[in-house]
Image (cartoon, helix red, strand yellow):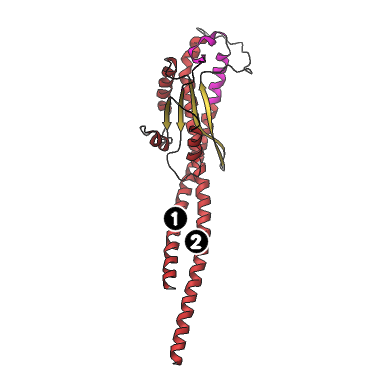
């Protein structure tokens, strides 16, 4: 009986420590959600605006000659994989890497500590990823695409659906697509459409990368908060059950001691 009480006390102490950890991590995630979602919305807004501009240019017959719109027969991929900086975020990282395994890439550019560790690259934290980082990456990717190092560029990231739902997805960013629903614009481009497109491509790629990183980071924070809330509830339930078992064991031990004392006095 004494051994059982000691074992229960140890388990209660361990789960109580875990409960404090999950609560602390949940509070940290909660404090970051507002700032992360605001940055995500701004990134989406800028991405949509530059997409509209690029779509207008890509709809021009002149721009079809641009190297950034050329589709090739080969399918060598360059993938930007954006994962989390930390774990304990439910299936956030696992879902992303599961999607990444579906593609054989000639080159992988990881962002986020978990992705950088997985692919053996220098650490680039998603939380600290800046527009300057994205601009440098955009120029490197554009150069590699034009030189034929790869034929298609995609971003594997996470779509923020809600605080309880995030989905791993892939976004193709090169070569540029000529959308069928692109409206005709009576806009004059100087000096010409292709020159503007080739100059704006770096801004376009940087905007797509930054928007994907910000949305992925907001998804990571939301996933961690939800995971920590669930873990906290489960830990509290286990703690309550163990406390009940502990109280019953103690009560049983006390009852046994009283019975032995009474039996001894009768002798």
Label 1 neighbour load within 10 Å: few <14, some 14-19, many 20+ = some
Picture coordinates of residue 108, whole percent (x, y) = 42, 28
On screen, residue 98 above or below 255: above
**Along the viewing direction, whichever of 162 and 96 lies nearer the viewer:** 96
Quadrant of image for the N terminus: bottom left
Picture coordinates of residue 57, whole percent (x, y) = 55, 14
Residue 189 numbered mark, or none: none
Q: Is residue 60 magenta?
A: yes
State the residue position of label 1: 18
Could you tell me which residue is drawn at 43 percent across and 89 percent down? 264
On screen, residue 119 above or below 17: above
On screen, residue 155 above or below 15: above
Q: Secondary structure at mark 1?
A: helix
Question: Whole-Å distance between the Cαs marked 1 and 2?
Answer: 10 Å
Kindly tell me whether residue 46 is visible in this rendering.
no
Please provide the residue range marked out in magenta: 47-76
**Along the viewing direction, whichever of 21 and 66 lies nearer the viewer:** 66
Circles 1, 2 touching at the beta carbon (< 8 Å): no
Q: Main secondary structure of the magenta part?
A: helix
Answer with the quarter of the image where residue 149 lies: top left
**Along the viewing direction, whichever of 104 and 184 lies nearer the viewer:** 104
Quadrant of image for the C terminus: bottom left
């Amino acid at each position: 009986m004494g051994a059982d009480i000691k074992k229960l006390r140890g388990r209660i102490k361990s789960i109580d420590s875990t409960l404090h950890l999950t609560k602390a991590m949940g509070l940290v995630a909660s404090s970051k959600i507002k700032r992360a979602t605001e940055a995500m919305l701004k990134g989406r807004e800028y991405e949509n605006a530059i997409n509209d501009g690029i779509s207008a240019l890509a709809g021009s017959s002149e721009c079809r000659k641009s190297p950034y719109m050329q589709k090739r027969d080969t399918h060598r991929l360059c993938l930007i994989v954006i994962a989390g900086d930390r774990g304990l975020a439910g299936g956030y990282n696992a879902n992303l890497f599961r999607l990444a395994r579906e593609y054989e890439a000639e080159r992988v550019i990881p962002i986020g500590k978990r992705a950088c560790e997985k692919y053996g690259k220098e650490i680039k934290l998603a939380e600290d990823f800046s527009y300057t980082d994205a601009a440098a990456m955009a120029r490197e990717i554009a150069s590699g695409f034009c030189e034929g190092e790869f034929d298609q560029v995609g971003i594997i990231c996470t779509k923020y659906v809600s605080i309880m739902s995030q989905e791993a997805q892939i976004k193709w960013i090169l070569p540029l697509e000529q959308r069928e629903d692109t409206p005709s614009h009576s806009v004059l481009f100087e000096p010409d459409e292709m020159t503007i497109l080739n100059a704006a491509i770096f801004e376009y790629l940087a905007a797509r990368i930054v928007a994907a990183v910000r949305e992925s980071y907001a998804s990571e924070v939301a996933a961690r908060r939800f995971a920590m809330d669930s873990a906290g509830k489960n830990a509290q339930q286990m703690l309550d059950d163990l406390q009940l078992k502990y109280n019953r064991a103690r009560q049983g031990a006390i009852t046994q001691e009283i019975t032995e004392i009474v039996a001894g006095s009768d002798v």
